Image (cartoon, rainbow, N blue to C red):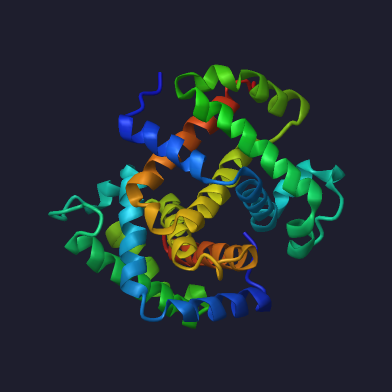
Amino acid sequence: MVVWTDFERTTIQDIFSKIDYAVVGQAAFSRCLIVYPWTQRYFGGFGNLYNAAAITSNPRVASHGKVIMEALEKAVKDMDNIKATYAELSALHSEKLQVDPDNFMLLGHCLTIVVASQLSKAFTPEVHAAFQKFLAVVVSSLRKQYY
Amino acid sequence: MTSLSAKDKDTVKAFWANVAGKEEQIGCDAVSRMLTVYPQTKTYFSHWKDLRPGSAPVRKHGATVMTAVTDAVSKIDDLTGGLLSLSELHAFTLRVDPANFKVLAHNLLVVLATVFPNDFTPEVHVAMDKFLAAVAHALSEKYR
């Protein structure tokens, strides 16, 4: 059972209430495809991912970024049941999408960097730690159904 | 991993010029974050009186790290040779698990994103990530 402090709970709710899912989702996901290009292997049907400019302006990348943020919101809305919330998504990533789970934290790193650049000084070490803990729980839950 | 292309090196050098004058602030923030977000790294600093974000030993160490990274930028064409004595220090004296180099690198990138939100583009991010990985590799050379 994950134990959240009051500070961690309010911090995560606060961050997600402040960010624009379309903007942050697009920025984080495109950054992941650019900084860790091997992650592109899962997105063969997305069209032109040939270089950073193409990725940044790719509409499918943008819309998928938003999908990811909306999926994260499910965890934010029920922080005490993240494992259950993501059981289906975990099975999907394992069985159908066949994503190497080590990639999950790569996206997590990019999301941290985008959120950091948006919140700037407000993204203190303590806030950063809470966000990192949230991402670790999300990643762990997504790994649960792999066998 | 992969070696640095000419473009990577130019990108790193151009971006790092922005850091001038802010080394202490950035270094302090990066080390503070590392100790807070990845508490296992505190095990290397049990000899410090105060491990809180922004404390005197943290600030001093942040400056030390940033001086070394700035030096590495100037030695970007031969990191292995340039960082030889630092590698020996980390391998034989400090004996830091090299996995932690990635951890500090990540925290440094987060700080750069907060300080330079517009300049820290995806292109700069990938070049810096590669550079810090190359620095980590050079630091690991003497381990075994």
Report the quarter where the N terminus of chain B lies: bottom right
Residue that appears at 75% across and 43% down:
A63
Camera sees residue B95: no
* Residue A143 spot, x, y in % from top left: 59, 27
Residue A97 horizontal side relative to residue A136, left or right: right
Residue that appears at 49% across and 18% down:
A81
* Residue B49 spot, x, y in % from top left: 12, 54
Q: Nearer the viewer, residue A99 or B112?
A: B112
Indicate whether A60 appears above or below A48: above
Residue that appears at 26% across and 46% down:
B43
Indicate whether A82 appears above or below A107: above
Residue A55 horizontal side relative to residue B82, left or right: right
Residue that appears at 69% across and 37% down:
A67
Q: Give the number of callouts.
A: 0
* Residue B84 spot, x, y in % from top left: 41, 73
Report the quarter where the C terminus of chain B lies: bottom left
